[in-house]
């Protein structure tokens, strides 16, 4: 380890405090610290300071510490994945379902990071491509790609196929195409299954379909999901990736979602597994059965 990045939720005072603490631990260990320019401005860290690198791209970084909630991690993962940089996520948010450690565990976690006493877990990402007459837009998603109606709009008519075979032609509020990591996010709220994050599959989950028979489908990771909006309704339609970036969709657009060529690398310290997280974060009832009546 020579250089560690710090990505922080700039709206959380606790996260900013922890960023300063981490910088002190890392520089005391003889490591360089990288932060994005916007973060350096908010933190008051001057470019050119000893062992501090401020820049736009995380070049030469061995790992990154992400301070915030799940939204901060989603943003950081989309930014760092193309560079192959592993991330240690510290929960400074509300749920922290994707986080590896809590703020109270910070110091031993940073010590383990510096001494390279960790494993790296790779998480599959999705790439969404929107092609129209005068546009081609690409999005990277850690959790999900969502195609849905805009506010106060009517239901939308969607045609969906996987590798050229139709799997749906129905009216609904929208569609969620998610990774296994995202199976415990919006897809779960829409009735989709819980999938272990190390599995590789593409989940296709309708949102409130106008059909009793429409259910989630798990596609193979090398298959391509294609979606078209049928122009029989006046609803406005939008596509969003992880709820952070998106585009307006017209009936002339073709939407293609597939497994991305890059992956998110999460640093794991072995302190909790997926099923423990289900119990702690989602209070999964199978792990907390009700007591029988006395």
Image: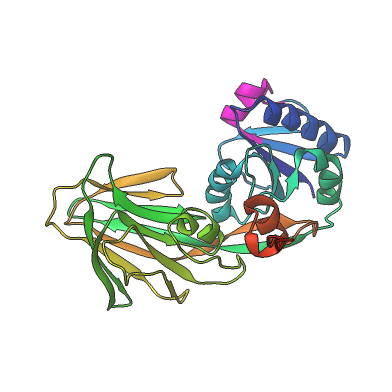
Looking at the rendered image, the quarter that the C terminus falls into is: bottom right
Q: Residue shown at 50%/72% (left/top)?
A: 201
Q: Residue furthest front?
A: 294
Compare residues 117 and 94 and report the one nearer the observer.
94
Q: Residue shown at 56%/60% (left/top)?
A: 181
Left or right: 157 as drawn, with respect to 55: left
Tell me if I can see residue 215 in this picture.
Answer: yes
Left or right: 254 as drawn, with respect to 187: left
Residue 56: quadrant of the picture: top right
Compare residues 267 and 35 and report the one nearer the observer.
267
Q: Residue furthest left?
A: 232
Left or right: 281 as drawn, with respect to 104: left
Q: Position of residue 13 (x, y in %)?
A: 67, 24
Q: Residue shown at 55%/58% (left/top)?
A: 184
Q: Residue furthest top?
A: 44
Compare residues 139 and 98 and report the one nearer the observer.
98
Compare residues 120 and 56 and report the one nearer the observer.
120
Magenta span contains residue 44 = yes
Region rendered in magenta: 35-48
Q: Position of residue 255 (x, y in %)?
A: 29, 60
| 29 is higher (above) or lower (below) than 84 | above
| 146 is higher (above) or lower (below) than 227 | above
Q: Residue shown at 33%/54% (left/top)?
A: 147
Magenta span contains residue 282 = no
Q: Position of residue 239 (x, y in %)?
A: 33, 50
Q: Position of residue 154 (x, y in %)?
A: 21, 48
């Amino acid at each position: 380890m020579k250089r560690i990045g710090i990505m922080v939720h700039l709206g959380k005072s606790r996260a900013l405090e922890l960023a300063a603490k981490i910088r002190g631990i890392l520089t005391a260990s003889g490591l360089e610290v990288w932060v994005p320019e916007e973060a350096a401005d908010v933190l008051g860290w001057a470019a050119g300071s000893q062992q501090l690198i401020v820049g736009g791209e995380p070049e030469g970084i061995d790992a990154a510490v992400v301070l915030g909630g799940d939204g901060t991690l989603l943003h950081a993962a989309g930014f760092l994945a193309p560079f192959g940089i592993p991330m240690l996520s510290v929960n400074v948010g509300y749920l922290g379902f994707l986080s590896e450690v809590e703020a109270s565990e910070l110091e031993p976690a940073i010590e383990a990071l510096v001494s390279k006493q960790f494993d790296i877990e790779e998480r599959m990402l999705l790439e969404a491509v929107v092609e129209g007459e005068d546009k081609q837009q690409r999005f990277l998603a850690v959790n999900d790609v969502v195609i849905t109606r805009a506010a106060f709009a009517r239901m939308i008519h969607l045609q969906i196929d996987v590798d050229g075979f139709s799997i749906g032609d129905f009216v609904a509020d929208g569609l969620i195409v998610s990774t296994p990591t995202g199976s415990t996010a919006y897809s779960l709220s829409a009735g989709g299954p819980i999938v272990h994050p190390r599995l590789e599959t593409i989940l296709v989950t309708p949102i409130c379909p106008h059909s009793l028979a429409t259910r989630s489908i798990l596609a193979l990771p090398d298959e391509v999901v294609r979606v078209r909006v049928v122009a029989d309704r006046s609803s406005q339609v939008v596509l969003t990736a992880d709820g952070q970036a998106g585009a307006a969709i017209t009936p002339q657009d073709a939407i293609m979602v597939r497994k991305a060529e890059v992956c998110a690398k999460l640093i794991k310290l072995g302190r909790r597994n997926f099923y423990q997280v289900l119990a702690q974060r989602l209070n999964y009832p199978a792990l907390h059965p009700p007591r029988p009546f006395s």
